[in-house]
């Protein structure tokens, strides 16, 4: 015979199980929303811009490489006037707009970082862009002496950072969606 106390106890246990399950599902949904925002507003755009910039730079290097394969801007102490003119064209048309867009993603969407502190590589990228702002201002005034940023572009570190964080989030997204994650990013040949 079921007593009133047992009925109330079973109802309470059922209510608690339903409540805890709803809480867990709500937390899971909130985590999925956050990951989707991180991917679509921060790490996805940053990765796409970084990859586009790298592939375009590789194409620039392939088209304008010296006979010995060296980059006419990166690997030469005194580039020729022709190479510098071509570099300024590519820099103002493609490279600087790309790195500005990367900086803008970092500055405007920093709340979507995985980390609790701003990673050094992202600060280095922002400093690189600031260095190019000075170079561009000089070009505008007719001073063509400087042709690169005073701060080196953190290409390798940024490449590793963006690919790693994007892949981590895609794996977590797939897990939350109940899918098997297999994240492979295309490699530049």
Image: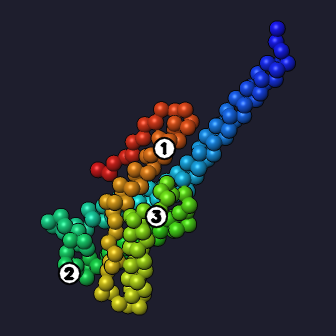
Q: Which residue is mark 1?
A: 170
Q: Earlier in the sequence, mark 3 or mark 1?
A: 3
Residue drawn at x 59%, y 44% as measured from the top left: 32
Q: Is residue 175 left or right of residue 124?
A: right
Cα distance between the residues tagged 2 and 1: 44 Å
Mark in the foreground, 2 or 1: 1
Residue 153 higher or lower than 15, as above or below: below
Q: Determine crowd level at label 2: few under 14, some 14-19, many 20+ residues with C-alpha closer than 10 A.
A: few
Q: Which residue is mark 2?
A: 78
Q: Determine crowd level at label 1: few under 14, some 14-19, many 20+ residues with C-alpha closer than 10 A.
A: some
Image location (x, y in percent) of residue 78: 20, 81
**Residue 2 versus residue 177: which sits nearer the camera?**
2
Residue drawn at x 25%, y 82% as measured from the top left: 81
Image location (x, y in percent) of residue 41: 55, 56
Q: Is residue 119 left or right of residue 145?
A: right
Q: Are marks 3 and 1 in contact (CB under 8 Å)?
A: no
Q: Which residue is mark 3?
A: 118
Q: Earlier in the sequence, mark 2 or mark 3?
A: 2
Cα distance between the residues tagged 2 and 3: 36 Å
**Residue 189 versus residue 36: which sits nearer the camera?**
36
Image location (x, y in percent) of residue 73: 26, 73
Mark in the foreground, 2 or 3: 3
Cα distance between the residues tagged 3 and 1: 21 Å
Q: Are marks 2 and 3 in contact (CB under 8 Å)?
A: no
Badge 1 element: helix
| Residue 159 sits in quarter | bottom left
Q: How many marks?
A: 3
Residue drawn at x 32%, y 72% as measured from the top left: 152
Badge 2 element: loop
């Amino acid at each position: 015979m079921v007593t009133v106390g047992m009925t109330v106890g079973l109802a309470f246990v059922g209510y608690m199980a339903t409540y805890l399950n709803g809480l867990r599902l709500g937390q899971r949904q909130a985590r999925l929303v956050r990951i989707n925002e991180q991917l679509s507003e921060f790490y996805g755009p940053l990765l796409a811009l970084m990859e586009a910039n790298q592939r375009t730079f590789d194409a620039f290097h392939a088209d304008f490489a010296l006979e010995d394969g060296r980059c006419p801007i990166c690997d030469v102490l005194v580039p020729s006037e022709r190479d510098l003119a071509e570099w300024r064209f590519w820099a103002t048309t493609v490279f600087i707009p790309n790195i500005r867009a990367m900086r803008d993603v970092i500055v405007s969407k920093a709340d979507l970082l995985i980390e609790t502190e701003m990673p050094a590589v992202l600060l280095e990228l922002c400093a690189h862009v600031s260095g190019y702002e000075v170079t561009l201002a000089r070009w505008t005034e007719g001073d063509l002496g400087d042709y690169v940023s005073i701060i080196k572009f953190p290409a390798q570190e940024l490449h590793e950072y963006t690919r790693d964080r994007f892949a981590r989030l895609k794996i977590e997204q797939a897990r939350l969606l109940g899918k098997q994650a297999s994240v492979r990013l295309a490699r530049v040949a």
